[in-house]
Image (cartoon, helix red, strand yellow):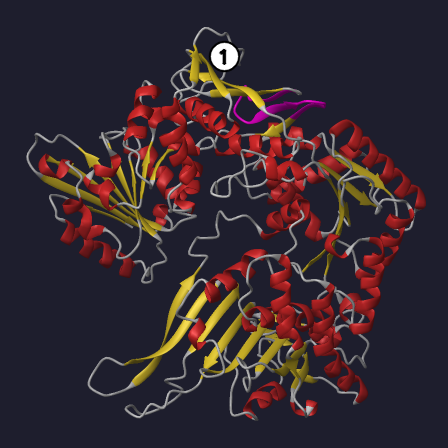
Amino acid sequence: MSNSQEKNPLRDPRDRRLSRVAGPSALVFFGVTGDLARKKLLPAVYDLVNRGLLPPSFSMVGFGRRDWSDDDFRQQVRESVEAHSRTTFREDVWNQFATGIRFVQGAFDDDQAYENLKATLAELEETRGTQGNHAFYLSIPPKAFEKVLKQLSAHGLASREDKSWRRVVIEKPFGHNLESARELNSIVEEVFPADSVFRIDHYLGKETVQNLLALRFANQMFEPVWNANHIDHVQITMAEPFGIGSRAGYYDGVGAARDVIQNHLLQLLALTAMEEPISFNASHMRAEKEKVLEAVVLPEDLSQSFAVGQYTSGYQGGEEVNGFFDEKDIPADSRTETFAAIKVGINTRRWSGVPFYLRTGKRLGRRVTEIALVFKKSPNLLFDNNEDSGQNAIVIRVQPNEGMTIRFASKVPGTQNEIRNVNMDFGYTHSFTEESPEAYERLILDVLLGEPPLFPRHEEVELSWKILDPFEEYWEQHQIKPEPYEPGSWGPESSYDLLARDGREWRRP
Amino acid sequence: MIKKLENTQTIQIEKEVSRLREATGATTSGSVLTLVILADPGHSSAAREAAVRASHEHPCRIIVHVANDPEAEDRLDAELEIGGEAGASELIVLEGWGRAAVPTESLISGLLLPDSPIVAWWPHSVPENPAEHSVGKIAQRRITDSARQADPMPTLAKLSDNYVAGDTDLAWIRLTLWRIQLAAMLDQLPYSPVKRVVVSGSSKSPSVVLLGAWLGHKLQAKVSLSTTSAERGLYRVVLEREDGDIVIDRPGHNIATVSSPDTPDQQIALPVRTLAECLAEELRRLDPDEVYGEVMTEALPAGNIVVDLSENDTFDEGIEFTEVFDA
């Protein structure tokens, strides 16, 4: 942003209606034909234009192998916008947007293509006034990162002159262990400075993160019990009812733990367990998340602290489904896990002695992501402590039906002194979110505005690998064979044993 | 589910609401506020529709009070709608005659949600003094619509005289997209004083006056309003600076052309927003809009706004702006 902003007399911190508009810029998409681009990214860009939050000079460039002209690409964008945009399609707004759309044809290693891209960006700077500000959105497989980044650098697309900026957006996964994450990071940061790199986990939208922080820190009633004095343990679950489908090429050798625990679940753990940041400022947020991730400790006996599984074939929810080994391109001796659960602790005063159980898997009972804080049992001297009555829980549902459930005991009406657990439910989707900007709109706008606070930095990525790597190494070293589990179940037997050993049990989400 | 009650009382209405909620399975409430619409007879449907749309973003209980003949015999009818068309909201339409034609706290308090903020909205007329109105007094937010009056100047003057924190006006809300673009344009330019602000639009449009007042106040500049006799509408803003003019020109409903020194003219989306969109923006925050307060209590009374009726502005005569789509 221009530094005249402080001197802009129209800006007033009290004026909350004045949302910020991105400055002049161009957004370059790599991997523009992918599902994500078609269904989410391109419509989100149009929605931003439609809401007047992108500058008039805003331009969008697609980079891909297809033999498309600018007009072919415009047609593609138009189709995906018409099919998927959140706001109404307005012909005149589209026409204005379409004038800034370009397509550059080429493979990721094609030198000439990058020269063409450079020329296109120069033309846009000249004709539309993008002022040489460029964001590169790499919606591509991680294998291609290095190639694209090196090319951007070699063709002078990553370096900046004068006051203009360059930013790059990369999506998870960020490496497959600590070492590779560092390598990837050194490649990225060789080309782009640390504060120009935006790492995106599209499971974890900014809205979700902010909802979680609001729940914890904008309320007085939760914080006093949010600690080892009251909480018995924490369960963080992300489950999918689907198998790996056609993703064998990516999935085999990666597995559930690397795919989900390393980034998504550990981010949720950090947000659940961290101390209150002094502000939403990027460095303050990061400091707290890093602190808590660094305080994560692994159990002494790793062999008793995990469960891994592979789904079998079966009849799930009215449908005959493949087992993991029936999926295309999965070798018969694959040890890649489709279910993983681990147990970790956090060595801080707040969480000392409270285990955090993380689990994720494919072909589980339903699609759900949730964080459950399970309270210590109440002594219950007055009432018969049958079933689990009196064990309170706060469940934060991340998706679907984002919201919160509080579980508490209530007396059953009638003559006897019986106690039952009941749920009290709050849902954001009771319509809060219907009109709220889609996660990708916020994300793209934040990138263009240069506001990174909720994007993880590579320090967090590395700390997360440090937590997961010992498990991965143990599995490798002991050639651990994942245990089969029925599709539509909640994982293998060993997952239940993991908690049963501690006298606990998983919630059924 | 829709239910009509004739010749009724709020106690019965409240009971019926609970019954309907149970019958539709809506046993937990995510409602965040009570919106009380103080409507004139025969005009409530647009406001009602906008409120229901806005409730998709802000689940709420909507109470529409329609003031029928106060001279008639006392009578209160109600129509309740829960679920279905009403979406996330609970809609209670009260038709009042006689003493029930006067909306007061006493009349409606049995229907207000406990603990939740109250927003009072006069969709058609600007009351004498919103904050002194019986319902306005208990509301955290009072929304008027000065564009519904024939002459904006005296209406705004009265709103300005009676301003209390928590007041707001739709003519101001309709300006948000204009203000966002103006602020964004100045972000991109080095600072240079603005000598004069010219806002062009209908002489009946209070948004024209408010935008001029805000700009003049913030930029410490003289303000001219170049008005036409068109029914409603805001067409153009010019900030005259040493280094050239900054212009936003929107002849139609959606697309504006922006010009600033040393840059080619460009186009942006600057759509005229619906009532529902404006209302949804308004309900996002219920703490006082201090900037609006400043415009009402400082910028407007300062009176350094020159209205120029004679200037002939070019704008697309074919395009109509109505009160609701005023800016």
Residue drawn at 39 percent across, 27 percent down: B324
Q: Where is residue A440 in the image (x, y as percent from the top left)?
A: 62, 50
Q: Can residue A361 be seen in this view?
A: no
Up-down: is A381 above or below B44? below
Q: Return the residue nearer the eye: A431 or B300.
A: B300
User: Looking at the picture, which amino acid does disc 1 mark?
Assistant: Glu
Q: Which chain carries label 1?
A: B
- Range shown magenta: B244-266
Q: In which quarter of the image is residue A22?
A: top right
Q: In which quarter of the image is residue A97?
A: top right
Q: Return the residue nearer the eye: A446 or A305.
A: A446
Q: Is residue B261 magenta?
A: yes
Of helix, strand and loop, which one carries label 1? loop
Q: Is residue A266 magenta?
A: no
Up-down: is A380 above or below B50? below
Q: Quadrant of residue A425?
A: bottom left
Residue placed under numbered mark 1 in the picture: B317
Q: How many labels does the image show?
A: 1
Q: Where is residue A64 in the image (x, y as percent from the top left)?
A: 82, 45
Q: Where is residue A333 in the image (x, y as percent from the top left)?
A: 81, 82
Residue drawn at 81 percent across, 87 percent down: A477
Q: Can residue A13 be seen in this view?
A: yes
